Amino acid sequence: MVEHVAHMLVHGEAWTVKDLFVLPNEYVYWSIQIVLYPYMTGLVAGAFVLSSLYHVFGVEKLKNIARFALVFSFALLPVAMMPLLLHLQQPFRGIHVLMTPHFTSAISAFGIVFLTYAFIVGTEIWFVYRKFIVESLMRLESTTNRSAGEGLLLLIYKLLSLGARDISDEALEADHKACKFMAALGIPVACFLHGYAGFIFGSVKANALWMTPLMPVIFIMSAVVSGIALCIVSYYLFMELRKWAAKRGKNFFLPDAVAHGSAAVNYEHLRSVQDHEVKMTSKYLLIFMTLALTLEMLDMIFRGYTAVRSWDALRQVIYHKDFAKIFIMQYGIGNVLPFIMLLVPGVTVRRAALASVLVLFGVFMMRWNVVIGGQAFSLSFKGFMDYVMPIIPHDMETFKEGLGGALLVGVTPFIIFYFINMIFPAFMEDKSPNH
Amino acid sequence: MKRRDFLKSTAVFVSGATLSLSALEILEPGEVLAANPDLRWGFLVDTYKCVGCGFCVKACKIENEIPLDAKVTRTWVERYVMTKEGKIWIDSPMGGLNGFTSKEMDENAAGMEKIADGDITKAFFVPKLCNHCSNPPCVQVCPVGATYQTADGVVLVDRTWCIGCGYCIMGCPYGARFFHPVVHTADKCTFCYHRITKGGNTACAQACPFGARRIGNLRDPRDPVAKAVLNQRVGILREEFGTNPNAYYIGLDKEVR
């Protein structure tokens, strides 16, 4: 079967540039998709933690963004799995991880942790929206001439209600308790989901950059940071869209207006809610940013101070090869700049949203510098590797492990959110004191 | 029963039970297996004998159906050149497939490096392959159990079950693993398991004209490889990772990792 083709490209060769002595089998095997995997998982976990701040700890000020964060977390959930599937060489065998898990491997627990988490988020959404589901169900049932879309919506709500149509005060009180319980249970599971993503890297003893017990904790902190930042940015954007739609009466962007009538959505009111929520949330963003930065600095200083054998190679990567990516893009633009932007008094919604965009970029660069940076030096410590992201794909592999695959993963949550938002209006305001 | 009698009989029972139970030994199944002296495949590389001809790499690729021109290989040869200024140059173009016929060192992106003969203090070749570790990290990290260790100590990959996640490639401290360019699953040296289990030799050892590579049974004290490991000064690669490799090297330099 020895094949004599012009030159057989092996996995990784298309985007790896080797410098000095690198072992023959070494390539950047884990590329952009594995950068996106902890990034997306982090966003899921972070968004959920933000929603829990309200549901569990009763931070009333976060009430509106909490509901959005919860639904958005649900939309992000399937996308956290996407990069993993896209990077597998045998994607159709991905199910083996669930069917024949080999429990000494950190990856094998993924199915269990992920499904547990999905179950918790799904349950919590169900309890939060049960009243809305039943109300919509009743409303749609009472209408005589339903359009095809309304008929479909009715069917969906019928299925989602699971036959529970009791919305008496006692039942709603029970819902509220269940919701609080699920949110409380969700926090450790969300942290576990992401801490565990950190463990996947931190436990690779062969990799000098990855192997640190701090990795899971660093990942959790940056997860919360990125999750909150994404919620601020998307909340800002969606509210802008809603304000635009409310002004012009474009109700297809406003599912709650469809449900409760156009009067329920008022431009001025939207503006004040957006202003309040974004500013409040950015305060929490600052707290978690401080924690994340402290841990990352601790890791860096510790490595330099102890300077074990791998430090020579690591220093080359950190201070020379990846200097711009680490100190300018990750810490400078992604940490320090937004930190100052949020600290300077008189923060506006726009400034907070812009700072959050920078934070998202910073966390992305952190993932990049960990995943790609961890493969930037040879196991021999005598050579280096560089990942050149394929921009224009010439086959499936360069699409998946290049810009195309990255964009696909980046866009999907918003598409999913658009449809989920149709069923569970994420911006609906509940007038009851409980939620 | 009186309290005195109760205490007395308890004391008798406990001491009696302790004495008789101490005759028994609780054995872990692993211990029993480890005490089994039958078979444990090991590899011996005599770096003094290697001349860097690359026959082993070629033989391995042909025997194990790894495309010759693919830039991955189950075994490879590294060339080390040390100079007077204390600089270390290492290269392994195409894994040493075509032998080291040029004096120029292939430093990848940094280009070809010509080192003047007069500057060289020492130079040598080191053949490498999977160490078939007793404590293999690749087996530990495989999420589906597609890579496993046989009872006689060889680490293998099940091509029908590997999902191609690359975690084992990341987990191996020796860079012994790669993705097979045709099958698209993780791949590595098998010690030519299909040959050695039928009494044959590995392709690389058979192809080596100088006897620099040998496979043997480490549990058999009469086996030449086991003898060499017992009697000579041998080294292993990267012992700091606690993998307990089963490939031993005669004449291992400190710069070789």
Image: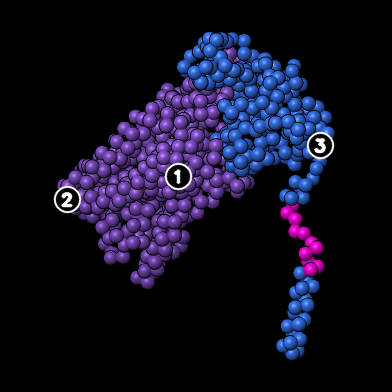
Q: Which mark is residue B220?
A: 3
Q: Secondary structure at mark 2?
A: helix
The colouring scheme, among rainbow, by chain, secondary structure or one colour, is by chain
Q: What span is colored magenta in the figure?
A: B19-29
Residue A326: quarter of image: top left
Quadrant where the image shows the C terminus of chain A = bottom left
1 and 2 marks in contact (CB < 8 Å):
no
Frontmost of labels 1 and 2 is 1
Number of numbered tags placed on the structure image: 3
The amino acid marked with disc number 2 is: Glu
Where residue A353 appears, as percent x and y from the top left, is 25, 42
Task: Assess whether residue B24 is covered by the magenta stretch.
Answer: yes
Mark 1–mark 2 Cα distance, whole angstroms, equals 45 Å
Residue at the disc numbered 2: A268
The amino acid marked with disc number 1 is: Met
Q: Which mark is residue A215?
A: 1
Please tell me which residue is depicted at 77% across the width and 50% down the height of the picture. B32
Chain identifier, colour purple:
A
Where residue B121 appears, as percent x and y from the top left, is 57, 16
Where residue B155 appears, as percent x and y from the top left, is 68, 36
Q: Residues within 10 Å of mark 2 (few under 14, many from 20)?
A: few
In which chain is the residue bearing label 1? A
Which of A333 and A116 lies nearest the eye of the viewer? A333
Frontmost of labels 3 and 1 is 3
Chain identifier, colour blue:
B
Residue B243: quarter of image: top right
Please tell me which residue is depicted at 61% across the width and 41% down the height of the picture. B242
Q: Secondary structure at mark 1?
A: helix
